[in-house]
Image (spheres, rainbow, N blue to C red):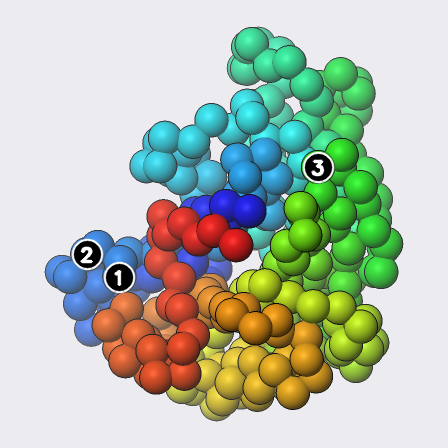
Amino acid sequence: MKIHFLGTAASEGFPAIFCRCRHCAMARELSGKNIRTRSSVIIDDTLKIDFPPDTLHHVLRDRIDLGLVKDLFVTHTHSDHLRAEDLEMRLPVYAHGLDHPLTIYGHDGVVRKCREAFGRPGDEHIIVRRIVPFETINTGTSLVTALPANHDPDETCLLFYIEKEGKSVFYGHDTGLLPEETWAWLSTRELDLAILDCTNGNLPFTGSHLNIEAVLGIRNRLREDGTLRDGARTVVTHFSHNIGLQHEDLTAIFDPEEIIVAYDGMVLHV
């Protein structure tokens, strides 16, 4: 599997959209891997997770053909993860030359937000499908299982376990400490790659997002449970500017732990 990290920031971006703090000013000056947009990945050019407001920027920056994407899995409806209004741009008049529908998978709130944004355009263009925790979707090329997150008490937020051609990836954000039912499900599986939330950096743990200490705790438990295969990798992403850590600061912390710090545009193969 090819995992293409399109964005690696929390909801405000890094540097944050309006912020004038010294950390954002430094990120602007350093540029490069310190410029982070709202989080999303594409797997093998055809399966996308989340549709943030920076998607057009991702398409232009990385020369992505979104017309190749067949399946879009949405973790939750927060504005940095679902800009449903932009999905209307996949419909006729706006988009041409498409040869398959886009299927969007999400919980009740995702379905509702999509319906409010572009209605029911017809299955030849966009299919919106409701999924629930522990449901496994066969996309035709991958098996994707929705798992409960611990993020927003007012919403059914999801994480995803993706299997393809003997490889498996855990997409583990946005979330705080994993629910025990998610741990129980993962304990019977194996992983080649774990992608984890590190929104809070070295700030205190808040519950709805992870910090460095919590990331290490989850990685270590995955190892102890035998869930991480030999040679499996862990990636951290979804960073807030409030942590005050630039990319080199993060790699100095995580390199000794053999954890990869994601950056916008990064591509991994598993």
Residue type highlighted by circle 3: Thr
What's the residue at 44%, 53% (across, down)? 268
Q: Name the residue nearer the viewer: 91 or 63.
A: 63
Q: Name the residue nearer the viewer: 97 or 151.
A: 97
Residue 108 can be seen, yes or no: no
Q: Earlier in the sequence, mark 3 or mark 1?
A: 1
Q: Nearer the viewer, mark 3 or mark 2?
A: 3
Residue 238 in picture, x, y percent from top left = 47, 64
Residue that label 2 marks? 31
- Kindly identify which numbered label has been placed on residue 34: 1
Could you tell whether 28 is left or right of 7 in the image? left
Q: Is residue 213 above or below residue 138?
A: below
Residue that label 3 marks? 141
Residue type highlighted by circle 2: Ser
Displayed quadrant of residue 140: top right
Q: Is residue 133 above or below residue 206?
A: above
Q: Name the residue nearer the viewer: 235 or 130.
A: 235
The Cα atoms of the two marked residues, 3 and 2, are separated by 37 Å
Q: Earlier in the sequence, mark 3 or mark 2?
A: 2
Displayed quadrant of residue 175: bottom right
